[in-house]
Image (tube, grey):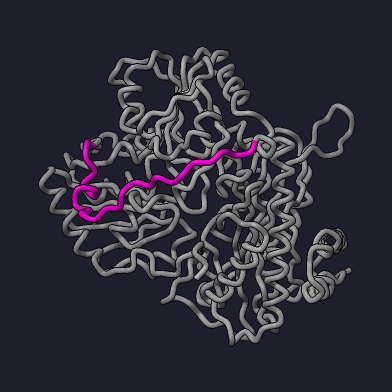
Amino acid sequence: MSGFQSFDDPAGDDDHPARLSALRARMAAEGLDAFIVPRADAHQGEYVADADARLAWLTGFTGSAGFAIVTADQAGVFIDGRYRVQVKSQIDLAHFTPVPWPETKPSNWLRDALPSGGKAGFDPWLHTRKEIEAMAKGLAETGIELTALDENPVDAIWSDRPAPPVGAARAHDEALAGESAALKRKRLAETLREEGQRAAFLSLPDSISWLLNIRGTDVPKNPVVQSFAILSDTGHVTLFADPEKFDNKLRAQLGNEVTILPPQDLAAALRDLDGPVRIDPATAPEAGFRLLEQAGTRISPAPDPAILPKARKNPAELQGMRAAHLRDGVAMTRLLAWLHAQDPASLTEIDVVRKLEALRRDEGIIDISFDTISGAGPNGAIVHYRVTESSNRRLAAGEMLLIDSGGQYVDGTTDITRTIPLGQPPEEAIAPYTAVLRGMIAISQARFPKGVAGAHIDSLARQFLWAKGLDYDHGTGHGVGAALCVHEGPARISRVSDLPLESGMILSNEPGYYREDAFGIRIENLIAVTKAESEPNRDMLGFETLTLCPIDTRPIDLSALSRDEAEWLDAYHARVRRELSPLLDNEARDWLHRATTPVS
């Protein structure tokens, strides 16, 4: 077994109804009519440590987003469009009910579930202020009370809850970071002074890891150090993390301007701060706001000061990402060449995952950047499918295989999706595959003025699907970190993103189409926002494609491609062939040359 991805059934036991009963008993003892169980931890991360996997422990649902609300007679599991299929296979439908979200707001659900005067509890460390304010607004004039609890009732009944992680922290090479931690601290401290703020509370581990040029091993897939931090307007950082994570060499590198304290000292430190204190309503826990308010400290609500500087990759970070994608392209191309030579019936979904992990190990991978999605036939229609021993499916000729995967390298983070027909593509998949590809090419070719946001260009990817009455229930692209989290805010390509795109931001470009019980299609490259040619006195932006791997041409309806689209595909494949060929053995190189034969 690889050691990277586990194929055990997540939360794979049948104790969930008993746990639900125990939680209800605890709620009754505390006078609660409802309790909210989020997927998130105190850092709002996509991946949570085992100690923080409360939603999975209680319900069995393991998606990367969602929450549950439990009352005396209902237990709703709120999931977005990515998990509508998955949730039904993971939860006990006799005890838990899937709830479509965000179509159904939690406040509206609570309005229907509780009488006036009802009391809904929540853990203030696990929700942002923005979340709580939205819920409180939705419950206004209902008589339903939102109550912050001192102790999480799930934790109270979780007798064998794992200990918090104490993964070793390491230095991130300044040559790869492109800027010293001292200069980053100075730069952000200047921002605080300019805005009249004495300090900033940081709760996002990727922001802290970026700021201090450190990386960690606390949670799988994301190389962050689980921590909180207070950045002073002098540039001093107080880091709240288990001191055992830091050896003497790393402490020396961090220097005297970084003080490391245990996490239990955070509450007192927040109460002692002089304001105004910058704190982000969208990412920081509600508990942080309450501690500052209880101390009478002036609060300056504003975005995490590291979040935009982190998103704007510098030349060194971009170069590291290019280098990582080159090696990752070698691994992916070797996988596709190997897969093409196999009898599909001799392989399972897990076999493909294990082979790809082994090939990435050859290219120096540190970890995978998320659990590899290897979905054959109907499993490919589960947007965030995670193969397990019980769901593992044998491949079959005539099906589509969707592989969405990525790697964490010392110099960069990758994320790529390819959809491969196993032999002759199914006829019903050709039109949507072609529409998805055309949407991906449209984003790749886009040119736009400064100030344009992800919402403005999202429709470029969907237009060809929309023309056929089709669509997909996820964003077109997410931000990506440089040797950090594969899903990084705040930039994204989505109908709800109003953040202007800026040079240096890295995004995924991944339109898709999913036909339940039949097949899934997604084609994904990573792209970097770059300056584009324009007339004088007009600033234009475009995209540089970072991912290097052939796109399967067999399911394309070539008659539907425009000349520009066919020429883009041929130019992309020529680049892939040119850059990867010298790094491949003869067999893979020969396959690559056949796979990148021009279509125009």
Asked if residue 151 is among those painted magenta in the image, a careful observer would answer: yes
Q: Quadrant of residue 420?
A: bottom right
Q: Is residue 376 above or below residue 180?
A: below
Residue found farthest to the left: 29
Residue found farthest to the front: 248
Q: Is residue 164 left or right of residue 497?
A: left
Asked if residue 410 is among those painted magenta in the image, a careful observer would answer: no
Q: Quadrant of residue 259?
A: top left
Residue located at (61% from left, 21% from top) = 187
Q: Position of residue 597 (x, y in %)?
A: 86, 72
Q: 6 or 260, which lies in front?
A: 260
Residue located at (17% from left, 47% from top) = 33
Prevailing secondary structure of the magenta residues: loop
Q: 501 or 571, which lies in front?
A: 571
Q: Is residue 207 left or right of residue 87?
A: right
Q: 15 or 59, which lies in front?
A: 15
Q: Is residue 513 above or below residue 398?
A: above
Q: Is residue 481 above or below residue 8?
A: above
Q: Position of residue 276 (x, y in %)?
A: 43, 15
Residue located at (74% from left, 43% from top) = 319
Q: Is residue 157 left or right of residue 323?
A: left
Q: Position of residue 326 (x, y in %)?
A: 74, 56
Q: Is residue 442 left or right of residue 20?
A: right
Residue 413 can be seen, yes or no: yes
Q: Quadrant of the C terminus?
A: bottom right
Segment tinted magenta in the rendering: 149-173
